[in-house]
Image (cartoon, helix red, strand yellow):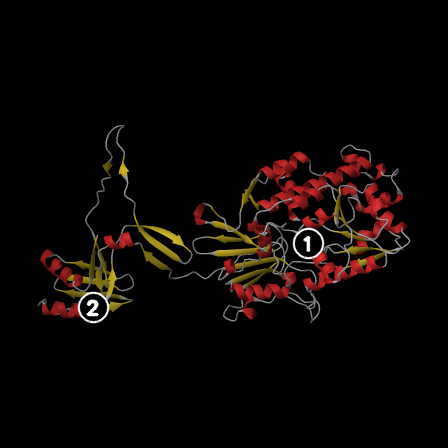
Amino acid sequence: MSFLGLPLLTERTAFRGAIYATEPCARLGRLLLLEILELLERKRMLTGGGSKPWLSRSNIKDLPAVEQTRFLDLELDKWVEPYTRHEIESCLERLTYITYKETISFSYELKITAVSSGFALGSCSWMLESANEKLVYVPTASSEMNRHPTALDIESFTDCDILLLTDMKVDRSPLVNTTAQIEAFLNHALRVYARGGCSLVPCTLDGVFFDLMENWELFLRARHHTPIPVYLVSPVGAAVCDAVFGPQWLCDSKIDKICAGEPAFVHSTMLQRGHLRLLPTASGALAKALEEPCLIFVSDPSLRLGAAATVLGHLAAKPVGAAVIGIDPHVSPGHALAPFQPLHAVEVIHAPIDMRLSCNDANTLVTQCLPQHLLVPECFTRKHHDHEQSVRWLHELVPSRATTSTTLLRTLEPVVVTKPAKKNIDAVLDPKLAAQTQLTLIDKNAAALVQTQIELGPDQCVLKPVPFTNVPMATGSRATKRLCVREVANVLLGDLNPHLLIQALEVAEFGGVHSQEQDGTLVLSFRDTVVTYVARDNKTSITSSDEGIRDLVGQLVLGQLSVLPY
């Protein structure tokens, strides 16, 4: 649903950033945008056309009473001007399509990968990886089984540095269960049908509608019930139902159907058999359909746009009790139906269906991913009652994590996550570079000085040989080798042992050696020669008026160190 606000961001603000989306998300989002636009244009026509005047209360006095009440409840004069078709198309042109598991590389070794969130066709979780960090962003996800989209990809989240969770179920009851919610809806709809009534279901045309059609057919078949007519009233209903998606977006059972030459979705079969009928508007065909019990889906859950007023008018006039079944967890049926009251003959049923992760599902996800740090909205960690679900702190789920490993998010308040610096990371020597390397043994360890190109990866760096480059000459001439001129130098490794140096000086017959140590600095003096050793810097200096003595002392110092040729 956040897709509906995208044109306002891209076309009416200074936002110029890149936008990435999967193809199903963009295709379905475009249909929903065009549907909203068409429904708003119909309201514009009802109130006399024009631009801003259609939002004014003064232009609704000639409308039917039901429409007047609904418009007054909307406070349309406070709305922004709706986006245009041109703005929608311009917005969609800025999208860059990506596929699941596709990695996009940016500057500074930043990579972004989209993985399935399991919520709807094309919905994604995002992995942001740099050379040493991995952040996983899980916006809206679902771990429910037996659904149409590709399942939630948990393996990609394992051992991430930061896990960011943002959107979960509204209902905190420990008894909340999506399967039970769907069964409750199906039983309500069948009960209303059994008494000869029609059920009106306000529903967004997203993954929930597809899942309901799947379960509706299975539900009737399990009870050996005859097919019940289903109507979908939406200007884009036909385009949504006819949309074809590649198998990479679908669950395994859907892929098996495609391979067997069968329709992937049950609603396609229902359309072929006439059990599901599509109506672009609330026309006379719908009024005729309401003469018999049926199930009617309208595309606006708030009942403020579309065919809601017309359908409710027909249902209220029927002698047999009809029903409005609200399944959107974000919409209160009481508020949605307030402009249409009184509806004495219509039963109002609240049966929300929420496919998102529950707080307990989020806790399970955290224990499977084992992140180093957890970011979660503060509201999901609080309990209003003891029996409610809540997202637990990371150190409670993973005992090895610190008590500071959870950061709570609040609206429009930025947070900073401080990560402990890693002192060492693993380095891998490229085989070609290893063959060119001359090793020197230092205290049973091997060391070498190399000229290398470093490639950074997660918790690892690869040392590769510097690629050889030629300097191009004039056209037609041969390339010549690049000339490298540098001074011959060596690298010294090791620590100086002052006691061994004093013994060596005495053996060399320099006479008595006077030593003085202060603040980590050792000063050795004999004759007119002074040797100064700074331990903390591992630095040795020799001063003497006799160059022969200075060279000899220098050789004694070098004898305790290892030399790496360069």
Task: Measuring from the top left, give residue 96's x and y in whole percent.
Answer: 54, 42
Task: Give the camera-side residue of 148 and 133.
Answer: 148
Q: Position of residue 171 (x, y in %)?
A: 70, 62
Q: Nearer the viewer, residue 12 or 217?
A: 217
Q: Picture coordinates of residue 492 (x, y %)?
A: 22, 58
> Secondary structure beneath disc 1?
helix
Q: In the rendered image, is residue 141 in sight?
A: yes
Please rate how many residues cluster around mark 2, counting C-alpha atoms within 10 Å: few if below 14, some from 14 to 19, many from 20. Answer: some
390 left or right of 432? right
Q: Is residue 344 left or right of residue 457?
A: right
For the question of whether residue 300 can be seen, the reply is no
In primary-sequence order, the first of circles 2 and 1 is: 1
Quadrant housing residue 31? top right
Residue highlighted by disc 2: 498
Residue occupying image coordinates x 48% and y 56%: 134
Quadrant position of residue 166: bottom right
User: Eyeballing the image, is 231 above or below 557?
Assistant: above
Q: Is residue 34 left or right of residue 197?
A: left
Left or right: residue 526 compared with residue 13: left
| Residue drawn at point x = 85 percent, y = 51 percent | 292
* Residue in the image at 82% along x and 33% along y: 48
Q: Label 1 amino acid? A: Val
| CA distance separating discs 2 and 1 | 78 Å
Q: As displayed, is residue 318 above or below residue 235?
A: below
**What residue sits 45% from the left and 45% below the top?**
107
Q: Position of residue 448 (x, y in %)?
A: 24, 57
> Badge 1 local density, few (<14 within 10 Å), some, or many (20+)?
many
Label ID, residue 208:
1
From what the image shows, is residue 438 above or below residue 381? above
Q: Quick one: 198 or 562, which is closer to the camera?
A: 198
